[in-house]
Image (cartoon, rainbow, N blue to C red):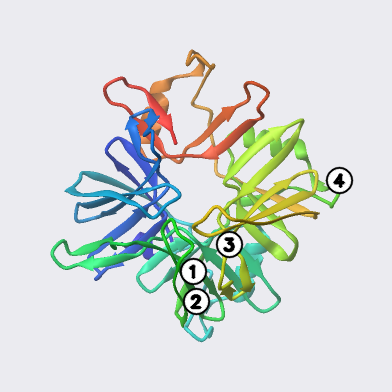
Amino acid sequence: MNDVRAGASVRVLLDYTIYQADFAHVVEEKVVAVQLLQSVARATWNTFKKDGEWEWILVSTNGVKHQVRYEIGASTFKGEQYNKANVKWFTKKQSCYKKPVLSHDKNGEILSGSLVDLMTSVQGGSDIRCCAGDSAFPVQSLDMTKSFVSGQNVDHVSVIYDSHKKTLVFQNNAYWWFTLQSTLGTRDMSRWTVGEHTSRGHTQSRVNIDWFADPCWKLVFAHDKRGVAKSGSRADLVSAIKNGARVRVQIPSYRTAEADNLSIRNGHVTAQLLKRLTEKNLTRIADDTSWFWQMISTTGKVTSTLYKVGEHKHVSTTSSYEEIRWFIDTKPWALVYSHDARGQPIEGNEKDVVRAVQSGHRRTGRGGGGGGSPPSFLGSRAIFDEQSGNFGLQ
């Protein structure tokens, strides 16, 4: 619980699968509950169900596990399950510092730390997490002006307190709960029915927020609008990605986000940024909001595509050329295992991967590269099949 309040990221090992928590709750100062949302239901350990279903899990430190399934692309509820589960919990603090970089009250008045230090962290590509009340979460897309920092979190599904189970569970007729918070103390909350473009409310509040920064990031490559290097080298960026590094991308006005997927083609890197919504301004999500997806390349090209939240309705696609800065995670990574397309070992030992997964290590998988496709690199959910001894990534 103390680690969660100190901005730590959380992973859980559950049913031979390790998950990165998307959102953490502290419940009545007794229980920690985390939402695990990046999962698609499987027919077997290594195959998806024929009819795609989202599989969301809410697991608590009192052992309660609530699992729900929704049809992908629709609001159709496919079922739920409650049970008690054996869980291993892992945490990673944002930095060696126990205090937030900035702590402020609901009016934006500084309680501790420094806004300048937070801005410096954002400029330096740091990963940022927030604690607001009884919630802790990553800031997935950051913006900065001369006077404040703001950022979105889009991975949160509605929950309610169950007095019998003494923890949080997913709400019936669930909705997405998107937030945009700022160092002014503002929090904008936009709610949308799962699988539909149906608003469930758009409200604002003011909250005390602690902002935590992970300083273990460095600028590895910066280029102009034509992709010409200004500092660092593209080769170093490519090498870091091939060695498992996470990547954060920054475009003008210090808009910064971690890449959700990365691909390499002809020596150029392209990053997908998928965790952002359209905004009215930097403290308010657009009323009729859309997903704001971007493809950002070391050629300088930025392609932005908008789709309405909850429906397959294309709004627009635009392209521009921008100056871009690329940051990598400086924490050490090691190649543990590699294999060919038939699963035959090339280097390392498969058992070492299994041991690392069971110990809570973050995964980065490499896929593609065959049939003319560029290799891709992505963070992943690791699945271990006890019967066969094999593992997979989702």
Q: Earlier in the sequence, mark 2 or mark 3?
A: 2
Residue at the spot 24% in from the left edge and 71% down from the top edge: 28
Calculate the distance from the C-alpha at mark 4 to the C-alpha at mark 1: 36 Å
Please name which of the two marks, 2 or 4, marks the residue nearer to the observer: 2
Calculate the distance from the C-alpha at mark 2 to the C-alpha at mark 3: 19 Å
Q: Label 1 neighbourhood size at 10 Å, few (<14), some (14-19), many (20+)?
A: many
The image shows residue 103 at horizontal and vertical percentages of 49, 76
Above or below 306: residue 29: below
Q: Amino acid at mark 3?
A: Ser
SS category of the residue bearing label 2: strand
The N terminus: image quadrant: bottom left
**Would you name the residue on which mark 1 appears?**
179
Q: Earlier in the sequence, mark 2 or mark 4?
A: 2
Q: Amino acid at mark 1?
A: Thr
The C terminus: image quadrant: top left
Q: Which mark is residue 290?
A: 3
**Would you name the residue on which mark 2 appears?**
187
Q: Earlier in the sequence, mark 4 or mark 3?
A: 4
Asked if the residues shown at circle 1 and circle 2 are in contact, with their CB atoms under 8 angstroms apart, the answer is yes
**Would you name the residue on which mark 4 appears?**
228
Please name which of the two marks, 4 or 3, marks the residue nearer to the observer: 3
Q: Label 2 neighbourhood size at 10 Å, few (<14), some (14-19), many (20+)?
A: many
